[in-house]
Amino acid sequence: MEKDNEKRLEELKKSVRETDDRILELFRQRMDISKEMAGIKKECGIPGSDISYERNRLAEISKEAGDEYSDYAYSLFSNIMDLGRTVQTSTMTDKTPLEGEIESAIKNTPALFPENVIVACKGVEGAYSQQACDKLFLKPSIMYFSNFEGVFSAVANGLCQYGVLPLENSTAGSVNQIYDLMMKYNFFIIRSTRLKIDHNLLVKPGTRKEDIREIYSHEQALNQSAEFLKSMKNARPVVCANTALAAKMVAESDRNDVAALSSISCAELYGLKCLEYSVQDKGNNYTRFICISKNMEIYPGADKTSIMMTLPHRPGSLYKVLGRFYALNINLLKLESRPMPDRDFEFMFYFDIESSVYSARFSNIMAQLEEISEEFKYLGSYSEVI
């Protein structure tokens, strides 16, 4: 009996392969027909897609498939129609405006990353943004702003050529305010870097650990050091704008019962003493920073791309986008969604993808995503500094 089942299983596997071969041949025919239709439509000036026809045809296919396979058939043929539409779009369109802008940026961007430039950062001297800036640029002149919007605005208005902003932390997650501001400002990401974040307990010389009654720091730093703060039973955490400002506040205070969670470089900068090193809950605590510019600049070696999209508010919209990445073997590094202001239950999706900007698959995915999205915003192609 077992041998009969094994024999039958092999026969079924063979039937599946033969069926797959027939499906593949029909798929090729379907795509060739789409190409030929695209050529005729282009010649006659007819729009590439017919949404009404596709909707009616999908309804017919679902009915013909029967109750058991109706949903599966709808999903399969919906994807096939999407691919056919993509083939038609690529056939009918010689080059999208975005493709031309990217090619121009690649051609006109200098081979070497700039050195002596004016860069906008949030905070004060010693802030983690400043440390990230020093990692990105050799000789930056830094202008400090009190909030993230000030950095975006300085770049948008030409006050600073570049801006450095924290995007996400390995333990605390994304900096949501940055994603919200991305929807408001026009800019391009030109480089990124990751910075090891160590929070240290800094005090004025002479202050003892048991004397501390308040600990100043940024909200994320306090959250990342929650277990340590529990051990400081007599000390109250106090949120301030950033970790470097916390160190500065302690240094300038006339009190001897306050401390800051800040970087070790701030201890030397503000004349403070470190009582406890690396008090964050997790040792592998990294923050990813991006460098933004008003102009599109694509430097040699760019292998990461960031985009933002809004999608049609109907089932399967996000699935179709993810399917395109899978079909082209493009690795998705990050997916983030943020509610859109003044638009009920609508979201902007943020994607980081891994693909060389010089590859054919990169051009292919850019054209496809523009086609299937309601709104599409290319944020730049860049490399990450280790």
Image: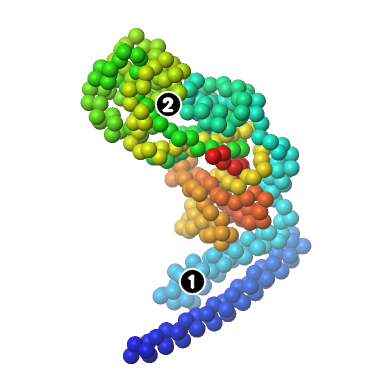
Image depth: mark 2 or mark 1 in front: 2
Q: How crowded is mark 1: few (under 14 residues within 10 Å), some or many (20 or more)?
A: some
Residue 342 disc label? none
Looking at the image, can residue 38 be seen? yes
At label 2, the amino acid type is: Ser
Q: Which residue is identified by label 2?
A: 263
Percent coordinates x, y for residue 116 in the rendering: 65, 25
Percent coordinates x, y for residue 29 in the rendering: 65, 74
Q: Residue at x 70, y 64 (%)?
A: 38
Q: Which residue is drawn at 52% across and 80% down?
A: 17
Q: Residue at x 58, y 66 (%)?
A: 81
Q: What element carries label 2?
A: loop
121 up-or-down from 364: above or below: above
Q: Which of marks 2 and 1 is nearer the N terminus?
A: 1
Q: What element carries label 1?
A: helix
At label 1, the amino acid type is: Ala
Q: Which residue is identified by label 1?
A: 73
Q: Residues within 10 Å of mark 2 (few under 14, many from 20)?
A: many
- 143 vs 267, left or right, is right
Q: In which quarter of the image is residue 190?
A: top right
The residue nearer to you, when weighing 310 against 364, is 364
Percent coordinates x, y for residue 262 in the rendering: 40, 25
The quarter of the image holding the N terminus is bottom left
C-alpha gap between disc 2 and disc 1: 57 Å
257 up-or-down from 344: above or below: above
The residue nearer to you, when weighing 239 against 71, is 239
361 up-or-down from 150: above or below: below
- 81 vs 277, left or right, is right
